[in-house]
Image: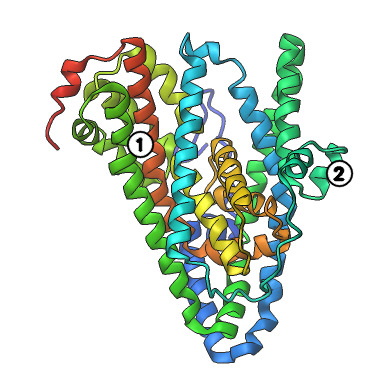
Amino acid sequence: MNDAEPHTEDGGRQPEASPKSALHRYWIDIPLWKRILPALGLAIIVGLAFGEAAVNVKWLGDIFVRLTRMLVAPLVFFSIASGVIALGDPRKLGSLGARTVSLFVLTAGLAATLGLAIALLLQPGVGVAIAGAEPMAIRSSMTLSEQLLGIIPINPVMAIAEGDMLATIFFAILFAVGVLALGARGRPLADTLVLGAEVMMHLVRVVIETAPIGVFGLVAAAVGVGGVGVFMNISLLALGVAGGCVILTVVVQPGIVQALTGLPATKFLRGTVDAMLVAFSTSSSSASLPVEMSVAERNLGIAKPVLSSVLPLGASIARDGTAMYVAMLSIFGAQALGVTLEPLQMALVIAVSTIIALSSPPVPSSALFMMAAVLSVVGIDDAQSAMIVGFILPFDRFLDMMRTVPNVGTNLTNATVVAHWSGDIDREVFHHVPEV
């Protein structure tokens, strides 16, 4: 036996690792943004070179659009149902459990409202020319009673099949509550719902692998029809996202801490800087969790019983940046399609953006898929929603880095407030935050 060959402990030869396929080496193993950017550049060149004839490659984008449309309804159902399952027993958080969950819902709602307001102010979607997504008239306005009745589906399966998102969300919540009511007997079905959410997240990752091809088709057609001016509105959208993230992180979240605990906002902001930097660089709330727990104890003086329960929960549902982003994108999409929303429809955007954000799966660009669900509740066709998803996707990686910061910020904000409510915060430690 050749001693140079690898062996197992019992003297046998170890099986050699199978070489990676060409698909892995030249596609899957390359970070998504490194594939999307060249596709974007090539799409711009093709669009400028061939003009309106570039619309002939739009079918490549249409494939991506159809794949996106395929996932939205089941993704929303399983994500929301599994989210309710996860939050089904607030007692796991102690006596403050219900107030803790309510605080996450409240801050997400404030963030969604901010995103909507910024989009209305900047109007980044006005004048956007997305090939294949023509301006449309909103379907007939319904009264409040009709809107409320429409939330309750007569046929839940049909509601999911037709992409009726309010009805789908309502049934998902109700179904999950019914599963929880069964207690231990409902555990297998609860596990199935959680597994279903994981399957949908995996499918999102699979569909995202086709994104560079879809981006090429959609952007080439858009540039061919509207020229490079189509990207001016993306810069306005990016400005809005950046501004919203700064407002949430620097003004709203420290302000909530000071208003509800009496602790100085500047001390809170200084104590959370490390976690914010990790959030921005990793674009991941989960990856930031160890640093969050460290600064919560070391800089904010939060006791372990609180930080060990609230922060892990928040890593799953603290999505203020996502709520703001989804609401902003929804208004962007409505503006791009020439749709003017009424006050009731804007309230729906805020409410559904909040629910969607709290249950958004931790998958890159999943917020875009969920945004299509928000657009559908105000009457925008799912095909046009998916077209907007494909149009924004090339830039989502950079926007994702920004919106992760307020996601982490709200987790630390709410943990600080809960610790104050329960008397589990060392105010002396908080007031002596080390200089950054």
Residue toward you, 342 or 85: 342
Instruction: Return the x and y of residue 152 as percentages of the image width and height.
Output: 79, 36
Instruction: Return the x and y of residue 120 as percentages of the image width and height.
Output: 48, 59
Corner quadrant of residue 212: bottom right
The answer to whether residue 77 of the structure is visible from this angle is yes
From the viewer's perspective, tell me whether residue 417 is left or right of residue 366.
left
Residue that mark 1 sits on: 409
Residue type pointed to by label 1: Gly
Check disc 2 and report its element: helix, strand or loop.
helix
Corner quadrant of residue 4: top left
Give the CA separation, mark 1 to mark 2: 39 Å
Disc 2 crowd rating (10 Å Cα; few below 14, some 14-19, many 20+) is few
Residue toward you, 25 or 262: 262
Check disc 1 and report its element: helix, strand or loop.
helix
Instruction: Return the x and y of residue 228 as percentages of the image width and height.
Output: 48, 81
Disc 1 crowd rating (10 Å Cα; few below 14, some 14-19, many 20+) is many
Residue that mark 2 sits on: 158
Residue type pointed to by label 2: Met
